[in-house]
Amino acid sequence: MQRKLLLIILLVISQTICSIAQVTPKREFRGVWMHTIAQSQYKDLPTAKLKQYLIEALDYFKACNMNAVIFQVRPQADAFYESSLEPWSRYLTGVQGQAPEPYFDPMAFMIEECHKRGLEFHAWLNPYRVSSSESQELANSHIYHQHPEWFVKYGKQLYFDPGIPESRRFIRRVVRDIVSRYDVDAIHMDDYFYPYPVAGLNFPDGESFAQYGGKYYPDRIGDWRRNNVNLLIEELKTTILLTKPWVRFGISPFGIYRNKKNSTNGSETNGLQNYDDLYADIKLWVKNQWIDYNIPQIYWEIGHKAADYETLIKWWDKNNYGGHLYIGQDVVRTMKAPDLKYSSRNQLTRKMELERSLPNVHGNCWWPGYEVWKNTGGVADSLFDHYQKYPALIPAYTHMHDKAPKEVRKMKTKWTEKGYMLSWQTKGKRSNPENAQYFVVYRFPAKGKADLSDPSKIVAITRDPYYLMPYKKGERKYKYVVTAVDRFHNESTKGKSKKVKL
């Protein structure tokens, strides 16, 4: 009996340790999408209040141990930043082409505030969309008025024609402009390539197909369309590399690549398809490393008849080609859908278990970030209490650069006006992406081994070369360890340590 009881206790302890390990990885992408299209708060709030609104959102995301913000800066061939190529967005000021008053640059502001908090900033662009309805007037400075031949109307919306080389060239200019002038960590595009099909309407690209595709793709307009998007993606990756090679390029495609009924390599699903309907060959982009991360939007529930979450996450995991794969999670649907085994709880637990059990999945991005901020269904509470209890480093982009930066040096402690400060120095300038960009501060008991793989020991992730320690009565002794991390998220291997009494 005693032996049986002991085995049960050991099993419980083992399961608890495994559970803790599962829910607290040291490296994990934890992003939120902040869309600006049709969000009234941006145009309705004066500049000072809008800044405060954004700061409050970022503070909340930081408190939830997020590490990346994907912010929509180009919703409709317009700009949430100062641009000589495209007009100010109507979703920022209410009138396209009108600058905010008092003036400020939302992207520059968000980059600065994100980096202060140790959050990455990913500039989110929609490549082809120009308008959402016929009633939306385009500013006089809009490129449409200079080159109407680049555009087509489909349904009630206006788009760049992806088959026209000048369209791709202009989009490349926009991306180059952003990357060259702003300290972005990544360029991000979502699932809108060729538009979602409108029932009974063919996309009106017959003229451009006849001029640019008919000779090479006779009777194969679908292949030509896919090649147009492939060219854009490959050219954008090259543009980014030639401008700032440390800036990443990520895509968040629609959640289904192909249905198995259309391709033996597809998933057991029955829905819209990237490859066949949006002409987005995401597998090719991942395989050829034209993109640096992939965030498929698996927004459905576990058990969904047409697009089961579990089926899709396992399909993407198997078709990853060693790339960075994160999962796009829908907050509302996840928190409202009942668990298939335990109807009293939602599907968050099972989805997180699946995400963390698969070998090629290394993080999540939450749609929309505003629902995380609202704590819809208790999502933020659950993330902080269980799945994001401790900070996490973004997985290292070793395919871009795989050498660790030099360790910090000259660690010391001193009393300041703010309190008891731990400080250190680094070699090399931050302008070099291979040098230290930010630092991880760990705290351990004074005796024993410092295990840097344990995220529960991380007390700060900071861009500052100092840390204000929580001094109490000077009765307990601790060992602090500080490591350096480069722009590609490679971490120095050992770190420098300092023992202090707090």
Image (tube, helix red, strand yellow):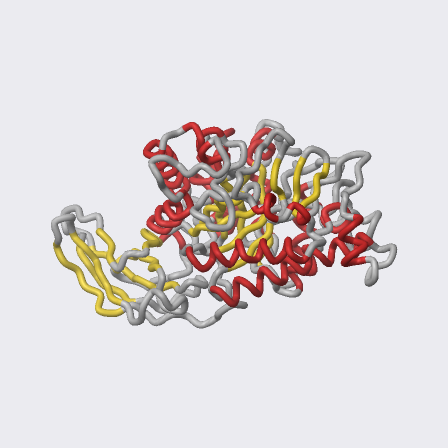
Q: Is residue 212 left or right of residue 465?
A: right
- Note whether residue 446 is visible: yes
Q: Nearer the viewer, residue 161 or 388?
A: 161
Q: Nearer the viewer, residue 131 or 469?
A: 131
Q: Residue at x 76, y 43 (%)?
A: 203
Q: Nearer the viewer, residue 453 or 147?
A: 147
Q: Is residue 58 left or right of residue 223?
A: left
- Note whether residue 1 is visible: no
Tally of numbered tags: 0
Q: Position of residue 384 (x, y in %)?
A: 43, 40
From this viewpoint, which residue is outermost toward the right? 219
Q: Position of residue 380 (x, y in %)?
A: 46, 36
Q: Residue at x 18, y 55 (%)?
A: 421
Would you place residue 390 above or below residue 284 in this image? above
Q: Residue at x 52, y 43 (%)?
A: 141
Would you place residue 59 above or below residue 414 in this image? above
Q: Position of residue 321 (x, y in %)?
A: 65, 62
Q: Is residue 362 left or right of residue 484?
A: right
Can you tell which quarter of the image residue 110 is in? Answer: top left
